[in-house]
Amino acid sequence: MTDTTELSARWTTRLSELATRHNVPGAGLAVLHRGEIVAETAVGLANTEAGIEATTDTLFQIGSVSKVWTTTVAMALVDEGLLDLDAPIVSALPELRLANEELTQDLTLRHLLTHTSGIDGDLFTDTGRGDDCLEKYVALLGDVTPNHPLGATMSYCNAGFTLLGRVLEAVTGVQWDELMRERLYRPLGLTHTATLPEEVLRFRAAIGHLGSPPAQAPMWGLMRSAGPAGLICSTPREVLEFARLHLDKGVTGDGTKLLSEESVAAMQTPQVELPDPHILGNAWGLGWFLDTWDGQRVYGHDGGTIGQNAYLRVLPEAELAICLLTNGGDTSSLYRDVYAEIVRELAGVTMRPAIEPATEPVAVDPADYVGVYQRLSSRMEIVERDGGLVMLDRITGPLAELAPDTEKEYELHPVEPGLFVVRRPGFGLWVPVVFYTLDDGTPYIHHGGRATPKAV
């Protein structure tokens, strides 16, 4: 049996060292192994300006890890026959109107859960604080130009999960925030998990920090309509209680079955290969992204809001789940350092190496890549400069109002033909930029999980 007191103490020291190294103001960590929480700790500050210490019961924003929670409820409704993975969404939501008739009539739940709908995912329009915020948001989607044909590729889609949340409301008659309480928080015994700011204020709560060195973010959270895509706040321990549900094949600690074993397995089954297999995983399941580390299956999800980042990984064969919640700094480097040590110690597993530039020269014809690639919230221009390639990356649309820096310039470092990496100032890890074409011949960039078509 693992000595949980010793492991927690050791990881308090280690997490503090690594958080300091990577300029992370505050972090919470918990580890679930063979059915028990074997380590739980928090270090640093939840709020640097107020001097509020991060503790194990501090709520952090888990961001897009929320998508797996929304998916879990959707799959429970599939179990109950209220939803069908492959039936048109419009059958559950007759008022749905998307950019074209084909998309409106043929879009399915499976498309939403695998980010293959083609709906441009980064529409961050505030539709108010009312219980009708998801309904109002979905009414805007008819004016959003798709960034790829239905099912043609994978492109990370926040908007699709807000649409999914509205579908859940329509078939249950329950508003999304309350549906999460009914279907997950209460059955799992979660007491420190919430979505609305007025609920979070009952607890010690982290605020995001941006920039290098990290400074307090100008706003705490996203608009309410982003809820199903990324507004859950929780602690590392309670996120792992959610992960335990999936490790235990849909059954809670008191024996209540929330999800069928078949649905749990379907969520962990590859549905679509990723154009960029280097940043998250090599495939997407239903809700989860999927990967392989040292021959071991891994599923998980990341989350990012305004200066807060979350990381959840599950290694089912090792009966291991790890949750790291953070509030600024070079969190991706912290994640890799922390998880590499834990999975090696508790599972004997080596993490997949991070991508890096090629060590030998790579023959690159700039003409194959130069041009403008554009979608709703992003404009990326690839230009030739001094014999190399540079990406001019601009955030556009409503998303630009949430970003501290809307224009960035990166040198593209080749890994192999069609695959490059960039590195943000102040951050340690390289981020992939993949050039590829759809079956219809349209050139695309895949970067940050999103597919962006060539416009010029």
Image (cartoon, rainbow, N blue to C red):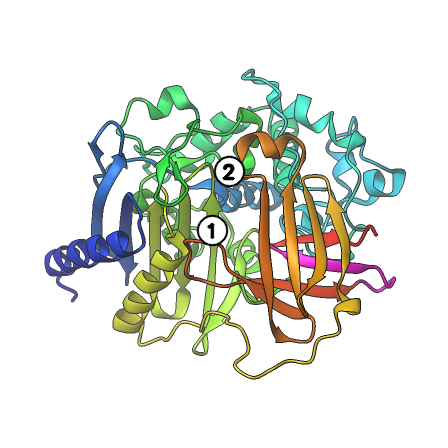
Residue highlighted by disc 2: 230
- Of residue 416 and residue 248, the one placed in the foreground of this image is 416
Q: Secondary structure at mark 1?
A: strand
Between the C-alphas of marks 1 and 2, the distance is 10 Å
Residue 245 in the image, given as x and y percentages of width and height: 40, 50
Residue 423 in the image, given as x and y percentages of width and height: 50, 59
Q: Amino acid at mark 1?
A: Asp
Q: Residue at x 45, y 62 (%)?
A: 429
Q: Which residue is situated farthest in the top direction here?
A: 130
Q: Is residue 325 left or right of residue 302?
A: left
Q: Which residues are magenta?
A: 438-447
Which badge, 1 or 2, is on the more N-terminal residue?
2
Q: Residues within 10 Å of mark 2 (few under 14, many from 20)?
A: many
Q: Residue at x 41, y 53 (%)?
A: 426
Give the number of the disc on residue 302: 1
Q: Is residue 422 visible?
A: yes
- Of residue 75 and residue 152, the one placed in the foreground of this image is 152
Q: Residue at x 22, y 46 (%)?
A: 42
